[in-house]
Image (spheres, rainbow, N blue to C red):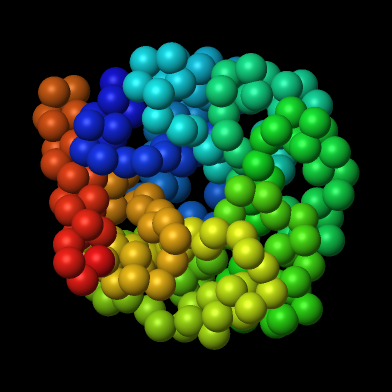
Amino acid sequence: MLADAAARGGADFLELGIPFSDPLADGPVIQRAAARALAAGTRVEHALECAAQIHDRSGIGVIFMTYLNPVLAYGWERFARRAAEAGVLGIILTDVPAEEAPPFLEQARALDLATIFLVAPTSEERRIRQTCEVTTGFVYCVSRLGITGERESMSTAFRPVLETVRAVSDLPIGLGFGISTPEHARQAGELADAVIVGSALVRVVEKADSAASRARDLEAAVRGLRQALESPRG
């Protein structure tokens, strides 16, 4: 299982995406992955079963990342309960802003599920405070404007927002979107508490020509990121 490979490579947590037909926040690599998953018949129920298997097999922490529509179609209370039973640690609803979060908070709190919301380089202090008030687990700080995807260089647009989050909240900060290389991870790790890498790793899996090479290449890619974070400068 690819989750085992990521765990062997040194990942602390696994962000498990639930595919959606209109993934507005995602770039082409993850869009293609979602399309492949939907074409194969993957539904919310399958993602819940996969999360439970990962929890039982590798022990790596699982956080769901998805959009509101699949969750509402499945039923929020049912989804939250099943996610908690599967050992999921938290949920990122990418397209739910802070002011629309309250209907989802009570059930999540009761089940000890973290509710993780995003702040962007354009977020003003008022919005950041509001987001931190409804967030548990960590604040997801988007490193750049636009969608997910690999980039040649690390953006610095996130720094004012990250500094504001530090000023108004004691929550850990995870930095994601566009982090593509070990050097990017090292730079991000100097400023944030967690480094989130998606498209670069999904592309590794996409390019592999066999199940064995997918696992091997993914483990190597994650290990490279981990080593960069643990370097003397990281």
**Which residue is painted at 76% across and 36% down in the image?**
108
> Seen in the image, is 65 located left or right of residue 232?
right
Q: Position of residue 10 (x, y in %)?
A: 26, 40
> Seen in the image, is 3 located left or right of residue 37?
left
Q: Position of residue 152 (x, y in %)?
A: 24, 73
Task: Please tell me which residue lies in front, 198 or 158.
Answer: 158
Q: Which quadrant of the figure has residue 28?
A: bottom left
Instruction: Judge whether residue 20 can be spotted in this image.
Output: no
**Which residue is painted at 17% across and 62% down in the image?**
231
Task: Please tell me which residue lies in front, 200 or 189.
Answer: 189
Q: Is residue 163 above or below residue 99?
A: below
Q: Position of residue 79 (x, y in %)?
A: 71, 25
Position of the N terminus by quadrant: top left
Q: Is residue 150 above or below residue 115?
A: below
Position of the C terminus by quadrant: bottom left
Instruction: Judge whether residue 220 can be spotted in this image.
Output: yes
